[in-house]
Amino acid sequence: MTDYGEEQRNELEALESIYPDSFTGPVLSENPSSFTITVTSDAGENDETVQTTLKFTYVETYPDEPPLYEIFSQDNLEDSDITDILTLLQQQAEENLGMVMIFTLVTAVQEKLNEIVDQIKKRREEEKRRKEKEAEEAEKVQFHGTPVTIENFLSWKARFELEMTELKRKKMKEEEQSGKCKLTGKQLFETDHNLDTSDIKFLEEAGNNVEVDESLFQDMDDLELDEDDPDFDPAAFGSDED
């Protein structure tokens, strides 16, 4: 017949020797006996650690039945971490029925805490790399601008020419209104296309009633004509004999 009390006492003595700084209890006069063991992870980044204090309580037929256990306290653990640790304890207890198991349970929790520290470090490194990448991308945009392609250059050129045309039109209109600028004939025709047909309309409206001042053509002999001009035509101006 198994002497459960003897096995429990032997295990407690071993646990006190293995965990002298983190083992607390038990009160042997109490029935059932309970005790706590504080488990701390290895140091992580900046010497940061995660920690939990496990409370175990023997049942009468332990180790043929699993001990009672709970998270007595914790530092730097998320709720999801607590759930994972309790699930791990249940799994290990079921796998080790029939033999004393507290050391095995504590060792499993110790490894789990080390994994949590590694995950925290990994998340922080990923976040750091993400921020560094975002900063690099922002710097590239700031100093290098948008890469030039045929498509975006032609689009920019069309907008630029449109803006320049509009600016010239506005400037010309402002100067015209202020009297500072007298438009050339070419500019008049470019800005007012009605001038293209103004002479024709005038002649159509006047018909045969157009009056010509002949005195304007009486002094044609006084004009200085360049007879060396290849386009000069004497017949157009008459001759001295006439």
Image: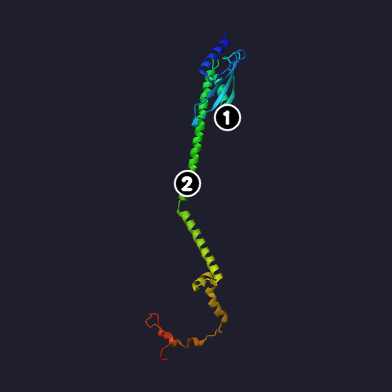
Q: Give me the disc on residue 139.
A: 2
Residue 197 seen = yes
Using the numbered discs, state the Cα–Cα distance from disc 1 to disc 2 in whole angstroms: 38 Å
Q: Nearer the viewer, residue 223 or 232?
A: 223
Residue at image location 53% in from the left, 66% down from the top: 171
Residue 151: x %, y % from top left: 47, 54
Q: Is residue 152 above or below residue 135?
A: below
What is the residue that sits farthest to the left in this orientation? 228
Q: Give me the disc on residue 116.
A: none
Q: Which quarter of the figure has residue 58? A: top right
Residue 170: x %, y % from top left: 54, 65
Image-based side of 128 in relation to 83, left or right: left
Residue 87 seen = no
Q: Nearer the viewer, residue 99 or 240?
A: 99
Disc 2 is placed on an element classified as helix
Q: Residues within 10 Å of mark 2 (few under 14, many from 20)?
A: few
Q: Nearer the viewer, residue 212 or 125?
A: 125
Residue 175: x %, y % from top left: 54, 69
> Mark 1 against mark 2, which lies toward the viewer?
2
Query: Where does the C terminus fall, quadrant-wise?
Result: bottom left
Residue at image location 48% in from the left, 41% down from the top: 132
Disc 1 is placed on an element classified as helix
- Tell me how the rendering is colored: rainbow
Q: Give me the disc on residue 80.
A: 1
Q: Is residue 138 above or below residue 110?
A: below
Q: Amino acid at mark 1?
A: Ser
**Of marks 1 and 2, which one's residue comes earlier in the chain?**
1
Query: Where does the N terminus fall, quadrant-wise?
Result: top right
Q: Amino acid at mark 2?
A: Glu
Quick check: marks 1 and 2 in contact, CB under 8 Å? Answer: no
Q: Is residue 94 above or below residue 129?
A: above
